Image: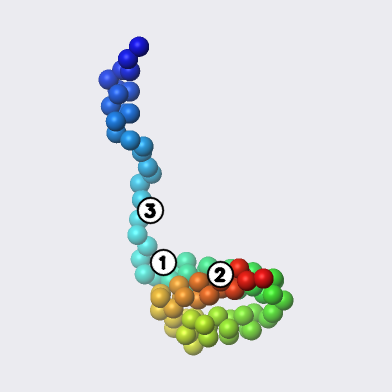
Amino acid sequence: MSPSPAQAAAATEGPTFPPPEPALSPRERRERLRERNAALVRELVHRRRLSHLDVNVELNRRAGIRKVTEATLAQLERRVAAAEAWLRRK
Protein backbone atom coordinates (compact mmCIF):
# COMPACT_ATOMS: atom_id res chain seq x y z
CA MET A 1 0.00 0.00 0.00
CA SER A 2 1.44 3.40 -0.90
CA PRO A 3 1.50 6.34 1.51
CA SER A 4 -1.12 9.04 1.26
CA PRO A 5 -0.07 12.33 -0.38
CA ALA A 6 0.06 13.98 3.07
CA GLN A 7 2.30 11.22 4.45
CA ALA A 8 4.58 11.41 1.42
CA ALA A 9 4.89 15.19 1.76
CA ALA A 10 5.65 14.88 5.49
CA ALA A 11 8.31 12.25 4.84
CA THR A 12 10.18 14.45 2.35
CA GLU A 13 10.09 17.58 4.51
CA GLY A 14 12.39 16.13 7.18
CA PRO A 15 12.17 16.49 10.92
CA THR A 16 10.54 19.48 12.51
CA PHE A 17 12.34 21.42 15.21
CA PRO A 18 10.96 23.82 17.80
CA PRO A 19 11.44 27.47 16.95
CA PRO A 20 14.72 28.93 18.21
CA GLU A 21 14.68 30.82 21.48
CA PRO A 22 14.61 34.56 21.04
CA ALA A 23 18.01 36.18 21.41
CA LEU A 24 18.74 37.51 24.86
CA SER A 25 19.43 41.17 25.38
CA PRO A 26 22.87 41.99 26.80
CA ARG A 27 21.24 42.72 30.16
CA GLU A 28 19.47 39.33 30.19
CA ARG A 29 22.67 37.58 29.12
CA ARG A 30 24.65 39.30 31.90
CA GLU A 31 21.98 38.33 34.44
CA ARG A 32 22.06 34.67 33.33
CA LEU A 33 25.86 34.60 33.45
CA ARG A 34 25.88 36.13 36.93
CA GLU A 35 23.29 33.56 38.09
CA ARG A 36 25.41 30.75 36.60
CA ASN A 37 28.52 32.14 38.29
CA ALA A 38 26.75 32.29 41.65
CA ALA A 39 25.59 28.68 41.33
CA LEU A 40 29.10 27.52 40.42
CA VAL A 41 30.58 29.39 43.40
CA ARG A 42 28.10 27.67 45.72
CA GLU A 43 29.07 24.29 44.25
CA LEU A 44 32.80 25.02 44.63
CA VAL A 45 32.34 26.16 48.23
CA HIS A 46 30.50 22.93 48.99
CA ARG A 47 32.92 20.59 47.17
CA ARG A 48 36.23 22.29 47.99
CA ARG A 49 35.30 23.37 51.52
CA LEU A 50 36.55 26.90 50.87
CA SER A 51 34.92 30.17 51.80
CA HIS A 52 32.86 32.14 49.31
CA LEU A 53 35.47 34.87 49.54
CA ASP A 54 38.32 32.50 48.62
CA VAL A 55 36.42 31.03 45.66
CA ASN A 56 35.33 34.44 44.34
CA VAL A 57 38.83 35.92 44.66
CA GLU A 58 40.35 33.02 42.74
CA LEU A 59 37.73 33.06 39.98
CA ASN A 60 38.05 36.82 39.60
CA ARG A 61 41.82 36.45 39.33
CA ARG A 62 41.50 33.76 36.66
CA ALA A 63 39.01 35.84 34.64
CA GLY A 64 40.81 39.17 35.08
CA ILE A 65 37.93 40.75 37.00
CA ARG A 66 38.09 43.29 39.82
CA LYS A 67 34.36 43.17 40.58
CA VAL A 68 31.68 40.98 39.04
CA THR A 69 29.40 44.01 38.83
CA GLU A 70 31.95 45.70 36.54
CA ALA A 71 32.74 42.62 34.42
CA THR A 72 32.15 42.45 30.69
CA LEU A 73 30.17 39.59 29.18
CA ALA A 74 33.42 38.02 27.94
CA GLN A 75 34.91 38.18 31.45
CA LEU A 76 31.80 36.60 32.96
CA GLU A 77 32.00 33.82 30.37
CA ARG A 78 35.69 33.27 31.24
CA ARG A 79 34.75 33.15 34.91
CA VAL A 80 32.11 30.46 34.23
CA ALA A 81 34.66 28.47 32.21
CA ALA A 82 37.24 28.77 35.01
CA ALA A 83 34.71 27.60 37.60
CA GLU A 84 33.64 24.66 35.47
CA ALA A 85 37.28 23.65 34.90
CA TRP A 86 37.95 23.89 38.65
CA LEU A 87 34.96 21.66 39.36
CA ARG A 88 36.20 19.04 36.88
CA ARG A 89 39.55 18.74 38.69
CA LYS A 90 39.74 16.14 41.42
Residue visible at 33% across and 18% down? 3
Left or right: residue 41 versus residue 21 is right
- Of tags 3 and 1, the one toward the viewer is 3
Left or right: residue 54 versus residue 11 is right
Q: Residues within 10 Å of mark 2 (few under 14, many from 20)?
A: some
Q: Separation of disc 1 and disc 2 at Cα?
A: 21 Å
Image quadrant where one finds the C terminus: bottom right
Q: Which mark is residue 28?
A: 1
Residue 73 in the image: x percent, y percent?
A: 41, 75
Q: Secondary structure at mark 3?
A: loop
Residue 16 in the image: x percent, y percent?
A: 36, 38
The residue pinned by badge 3 equals: 21
Toward the viewer: 87 or 31?
87
Residue 36 in the image: x percent, y percent?
A: 53, 68
Q: Tell which residue pokes out farthest to the bottom in this image.
A: 66
Q: Earlier in the sequence, mark 3 or mark 2?
A: 3
Residue visible at 44% across and 78% down? 75
Residue visible at 35% across and 11% down? 1
Q: Amino acid at mark 2?
A: Glu
Q: Which mark is residue 84?
A: 2
Q: Tell which residue pokes out farthest to the right in this image.
A: 49
